[in-house]
Image: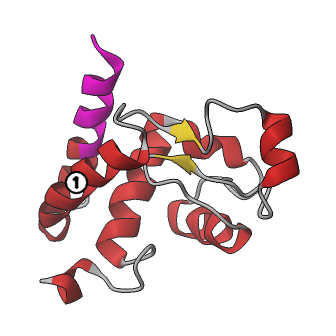
Amino acid sequence: MDLSLGCTRMLIDECKRQGPAAQPVRAYVLPTSFWETAHTICPVVEAYRLSEAWRKKNLRYYPWHGRGFVQLTREKNYERAERETGQPIHQNPALALDPAVAAKLAVTGMKEGWFTGRDLDELH
């Protein structure tokens, strides 16, 4: 199976797992994930075409640079992601690249307004 199809399915399934309140997120999470992952709909690391050495030298928020479907960035966001998901993402930022973890981060974050400061109910 094409990896992007599997990741798309994971995002849709995560919306279903999070219940009716997450259903409108699909219209938001899928195109956002498409854009944020350089059209792959697979979790990616920020500046994925460049090296880890480049990220370390050039990204002021390293090692809390973008990862996942939504490019989770900055230490406070990794701490929140760990609290909200129960996954040790702050301790191991690479977990944000795991498709199942990345799907939970994307759907929960968009539903609850982690990235915009406004939850989905406020955006209707």
Q: Is residue 36 magenta?
A: no
Q: Residue drawn 86% across and 37% down?
A: 53
Disc 1 element: helix
Q: Position of residue 54 (x, y in %)?
A: 81, 40
Residue topped by disc 1: 15
Q: Amino acid at mark 1?
A: Cys
* Vertical relation: 110 (above or below) 39: below
Quadrant in which the N terminus appears: top left
Find out whether residue 4 is within the magenta segment: yes
In the depicted view, which residue is nearer to us: 54 or 117? 54
Q: In the picture, residue 20 is in which quadrant?
A: bottom left
Identify the residue at image location x=67%, y=41%.
94
Q: Name the spot of residue 44 as percent of width and height, x first.
A: 53, 37
Residue 56, given in percent of the width and then of the height, sits at 85, 47
> Neighbour class for label 1 at 10 Å: few (<14), some, many (≥20)?
many
Left or right of 75 in this view: 23: left
Residue at 31 percent across and 25 percent down: it is 4
Q: Quadrant of the C terminus?
A: bottom left
- Quarter of the image for residue 26 reads bottom left
Q: Position of residue 45 (x, y in %)?
A: 60, 40
Q: Residue at x 23, y 50 (%)?
A: 31
Highlighted range, magenta: 1-11
- State the predominant SS element of the stretch in magenta: helix
Say left or right for 73 vs 14.
right
